[in-house]
Amino acid sequence: MPCLYSLIKLMPNSSATYQLGSLEQAIIKALMYYNIFSYPLTENEIQQSIDRESIVRSDLKLSLASLVQQKYIYNHGGYYLLHDKLELVERRLKGNERAKKMMSTAHRMSRIMGHFPFVRAIFLSGSISKNYVEEDGDIDYFIITQPGRLWIARTILILFKKIFLFNSHKYFCVNYFIDENHLTIEEQNIYTAKEVVTLVPMSNRDLVNRFFGANEWTKQYFPNAVLADTTTVKTYKRGVLQTVLETMFNHPLGDRLEQWCMNRTQKHWNKKFPDYDEQEFEVALKTREDVSKHHPNNFQKRVLDALEKGIKDFEEEFKVSLREKSPPERG
């Protein structure tokens, strides 16, 4: 149980900085992260989103109640948030319902993509993987391909979207590819960790499990996260049409086509996004043989910057510290 000292708040007019207990810090920072997306959390979601291991549920409940009582955070019907805004809970519930309705489309599109040449595993990513979709939201997919054919697979999928879906992003946004020989995500921070642990697998159970195993570094950020259940994910079985199409590209001319697809995409992105420096381009628009990432708004950097600003603003407003040092125990 948190000691009484860790639950006392200084008077608002105090100029001193008070150090919250580590569990209280973890709760606030979990809510801070989702506050960037105006998304309240349930108690269970908070537990999965904090960076402390072996959380005792009764301690979590006590800390939440104390933080609410002192108006560090708010509780509306079991949904916790940093601001006293019931409309954010209503917004979340509507987004949850939209995500639920779009799941059948996501499954259908995933089955279609699973028949494309060199596609080996498919996940739902982005907001729908967190059970939320905006009114104008889309469905994002994270795709693992056969090594050496990532760019052919990507190009065929993009052509399918442009020709048969009239370039619509709503149900078919394929913006991140890796190959099955390079499963570990390179950037390892709270944003990429959250994206990994919330991925929803659609196909190839064995490869999905390998991917999650290759990214156990996420536990340092979210040791309590519960990964998606893979027992119901179908095992991989290459179809006849997929086999025929892949055979067409498995020769030296296929190697040249693979290189051409990558080079052409990189030239297009360099021309379209001339303001990115080399480092920003590498993070937001990865273009290598084993990875393709198309995040032109550099959302990762925006989220990390917003999180740091949110923590600083909170510390200044409440005259508390969220810097991991627990106060000394007092008898």
Image (cartoon, rainbow, N blue to C red):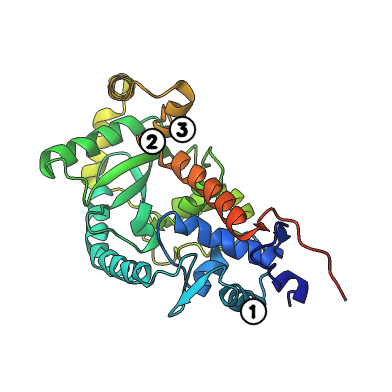
The amino acid beneath tag 1 is Leu
- Marks 3, 2: nearer the viewer: 3
Is disc 3 placed on a helix, strand or loop?
helix
Count residues near mark 2 (Cα–Cα under 10 Å), then give few for <14, some for 14-19, many for 20+: some
Q: Secondary structure at mark 1?
A: helix
**Residue at (59% x, 65% y) in the render:** 27
Image location of residue 181, percent across then percent down: 49, 37
Q: Residues within 10 Å of mark 3 (few under 14, many from 20)?
A: some
- Give the amino acid type for the residue marked by disc 3 in the picture: Val
Q: Position of residue 108 (x, y in %)?
A: 22, 58
- Disc marking residue 42: none
Tag of residue 283? 3
The local secondary structure at tag 2 comes to strand
**Mark 1 closeness class: few <14, some 14–19, many ≥20 residues within 10 Å:** some
72 sits to left or right of 34: right
Do labels 3 and 2 touch, CB within 8 Å? no
Q: Amino acid at mark 2?
A: Lys
**Residue 165 seen:** yes
- Residue at the spot 37% in from the left edge and 71% down from the top edge: 89
Q: Disc 1 vs disc 2: which is toward the camera?
A: 1
Q: Which label lies toward us, 3 or 1?
A: 1
* Residue at numbered disc 2: 293
Query: Which mark, by number, is residue 62?
Result: 1
**Earlier-in-chain disc, 3 versus 2:** 3
Can you tell which quarter of the image residue 204 is in? bottom left
Q: Is residue 202 visible?
A: no
Frontmost residue, 313 versus 115: 313
Q: Residue at x 11, y 43 (%)?
A: 164
